[in-house]
Image (cartoon, helix red, strand yellow):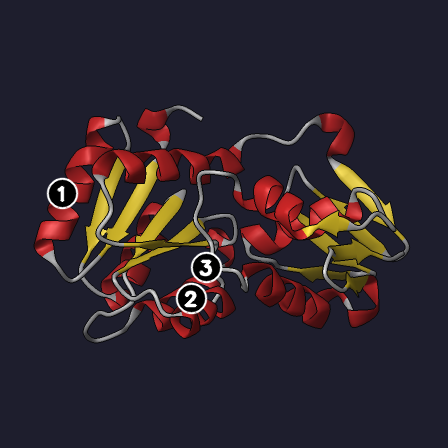
Amino acid sequence: MKKKHTKILLVDDEPDILEIIGYNLSSEGYQIYTAENGIEAISQAKKQKPHLIILDVMMPEMDGIEACEKLRAIPDLSETVITFLTARGEDYSQVAGFEAGADDYITKPIKPKVLVSKVKALLRRFKEADEQDASMKLGNLVINREEYKVLKGKEEIILPRKEFELLALLASKPGKVFKREDILDRVWGNEVVVGGRTIDVHIRKLREKIGDERFKTVKGVGYKFVV
């Protein structure tokens, strides 16, 4: 994916933040769009269909958590990566963000070069999957990596990107116990900072959508997928 074709939507109620981040990312060749609250963010996202949305949490009119929930309900944005950028670093705020469907969480202030590095890591999610791994069938579950689709019987299940990637990883080797550190490395990447409860939140959401019996916790080690 060429940078000049990559759209990033920045959402923050502080003009200085929008200007600084926008300047640094546009200097890298990305197409930058901005919004100052959640309502504007939804309008811009529908219009531009960005690849990545960097979303502040604390904003007037509609905060980032509510905006994220509404964005995740829009089918055309199902593959859009959403990351929160906020000064709030409390665990409950991070959990709320992941519950709303966010893919990641970045705490500000952050140095421009570090932010650019993290944006590059997040946008790698758009690389095409290898053809040999394009589709997996496990019982009544079909996981299509190429189209980011999950079918449970005849029902199509829409998953946020990180939930999908976690499911695809675990399902790639049914019965194998994936260690927590391996999951963090392979789904989130070494450059991305995530909270300790990140995996647990995503597994719980997958259990609700795919089926509790599909995921087994190996205490003190990690998780495995069961056919």
- Quadrant the N terminus occupies: top left
Disc 1 residue type (three-letter) = Ile
Secondary structure category for the residue under label 2:
helix
Residue 62 sits above or below residue 188 on the image? below
User: Could you tell me which residue is drawn at 27 percent across and 66 percent down?
Assistant: 38
**Residue at numbered disc 3:** 102
Q: Earlier in the sequence, mark 1 or mark 2?
A: 1
Q: Are marks 2 and 3 in contact (CB under 8 Å)?
A: no
Residue to which mark 1 is pinned? 20
Q: Pointer 2: what residue?
A: 94
Q: How many angstroms separate mark 1 from mark 2 (CA)? A: 24 Å
Residue at the top extreme, as displayed: 2
Where is residue 151 shown, x and y percent of the image?
75, 56
Q: Disc 1 on helix, strand or loop?
A: helix
Question: Judging from the image, what secondary structure is the residue with disc 3 in?
Answer: loop
x and y percentages locating residue 124 in the rendered image: 49, 33
Of pointers 2 and 3, the one earlier in the residue sequence: 2
The residue type indicated by label 2 comes to Gln
Seen from this angle, which residue lies furthest front?
Answer: 220
Q: Are marks 1 and 2 in contact (CB under 8 Å)?
A: no
Residue 191, given in percent of the width and then of the height, sits at 44, 38
